[in-house]
Image (spheres, grey):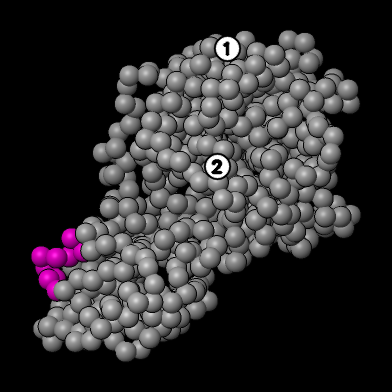
Amino acid sequence: MTIEQKIGQFFFPAVFINDTEENIQATERLIKEHNIGGLTFFHSRASAATNYETTKKVVLNDGSFQRLKELIIRYQNCATTPLLMSIDAEWGLAMRVEKTPQYPYAITLGALPDNKKNLVYEVGKQIGLDLKSVGIHYNLAPLADINNNPNNPVIGYRSFGQDKEKVTNFALEYIRGLNDAGVLGCLKHFPGHGNTNVDSHLGLPILKETLEELVANELVPFIKGIENKVDSIMIGHLAVPALNEGKNTSATLSKSVIETLLRKQLGYDGLVISDALNMHSVSKLYDQKGQLEWEAFNAGNDILCFAENVPEGIQEILKNATPERIEASFNRLWKCKQKAGIIYRTSKLPHLSRNAFDFKTTSELNSKIAQNCITKIKDTRNTVTLFDAKNRANLAKISLYKNTENSFFKNLSTALPCPEFCYERGDTIALNELDELLLDFDTILIALFVPKAKPMNNFDIEDFVLQYLEKLFISKKCFLYVFGNPYALQIIPNLSATAGIVQVYQDFSEFQETAAHQLLENMECKGALPVQISTIE
């Protein structure tokens, strides 16, 4: 390759599964004309994270899986140098593609006991097998961020929790699983995005920690990852003034963070990839096209993820970078391409006619995780109390944000028959009607299906629903089962007045069924909250 062709390898522009033919042809021209190194797949332009505060609607497409395979074949066939296909699939291909296997969020896995970390390995391996079957070689996961800020708007449920040892061990197990499936992994977001309260898709988070504090906590998973020769590390769009002479420079654009700390002090010589360069924390810094790409490369990134100015960026790097630096980054990327088996085409293109997934294996794995992570937060002998003849005569079930046909209620119906009510979404009138229906009942089993995993807008739990729960906990004997992000517990008032609380984490059918069995059989809850919840007494 010429020097210019080698520079092209550093660019991984975003491609969208549900894009127009015009956009697809534009990507093909980039591949042919600029010898780019790889692509990063997203569902659609509307689903890109920087769009989630706009009005663009995500249009679902049940054919996304087939279309993804077709695009991968099409793009590879027009590439002179095999492309390293990447995607962010932290909890599986379902994060980006409809009707594909979904695995639990990292925070759910973080509730597992330490002696069940093999289940995290299995998740990594199954995700790797799913990705490989569609022609993807590189998963931009998992997070190595220690989520020690409960108000973090973007990490939260994506982190294994706030215990640095567990985060370290589980992240490495996940990557080991990916690697055993033949897929590359990535620890992110260096030097640690956990203790932030700004979403880097929209603004620049600033870490106040000193280097000593980072080494003692945030950097622990990365240091262990470096010792274990992880495939790649992603740099986060966050500023650490202590590492930049007091300046609020994004780590992605900081030689002090990448070249000095990561490369020299911590001794990492693997692949370094930037976080997406379209994110608002960095994308609006430079008016000149290609300048951002050069600055990110100059800071020490080998791969420029979601680069939006490929031709201009290549020319800026060609004009400014030394041949030695270009060669060093190229060699790191080439080693990863060799490991992924694409240099000599030993990694096969996907079969268009084959359904690649083993949903039965996914379901069995999700059941095992549920059986080991469900967490009893408050217990006043839930099962014994609910089955007591007196309470049972005055017992009702409420489902919030799902109808009464949910798996949890279905699995309880035979052994624990009683009137069932639901509130899916509406207004205070619907809740007032529910209140009247519950007048004659003393004991209430509540299934709260938290609408969103992200904390924005109180996880989409309406204010009047929270107010309703506040009163209900005082007026009735309430047993609460929470299907969703455990951080939602922080916004639920009067939890101390409940008779019992069980945290279930996911609303998958396997988790609902396991929760029902736990209640009916008074099973031991083996999980532990991976984060501290301040409102629980």
How far from the left and from the top, in percent, is residue 449? 36, 63
Residue where numbered disc 2 is placed? 46
Labelled pair 2, 1 in contact (Cβ < 8 Å): no
Q: Identify the residue at the far front of this view.
A: 429
Q: Nearer the viewer, residue 432 or 404?
A: 432
Identify which residue is drawn at 66% across, 24% down: 333
How far from the left and from the top, in percent, is residue 455? 53, 63
Identify which residue is drawn at 41% across, 83% down: 470
Kind of element beneath mark 2: helix
Q: Is disc 1 surrounded by few (<14), some (14 to 19) or many (20+) residues within 10 Å?
A: some
Amino acid type of the residue tagged 2 in the rendering = Ala
Report the quarter where the C terminus lies: bottom left
Is residue 121 visible to the viewer in this orientation of the structure?
no
Q: Nearer the viewer, residue 342 or 76?
A: 76
Kind of element beneath mark 1: loop
Report the quarter where the N terminus lies: top right
How far from the left and from the top, in percent, is residue 223? 66, 47
**Disc number placed over residue 106 in the picture, else none:** none
Identify which residue is drawn at 13% across, 87% down: 390
Amino acid type of the residue tagged 1 in the rendering = Cys
Q: Nearer the viewer, mark 2 or mark 1?
A: 2
Residue where numbered disc 1 is placed? 78
Is residue 409 a member of the stretch shown in magenta?
Answer: yes
How far from the left and from the top, in percent, is residue 267? 74, 39
Q: Quadrant of residue 298?
A: top right
Is residue 380 a member of the stretch shown in magenta?
Answer: no
Q: Which residues are magenta?
A: 408-418
Image position of 438 with respect to 373: above or below: below
Q: Nearer the viewer, residue 510 or 161?
A: 510
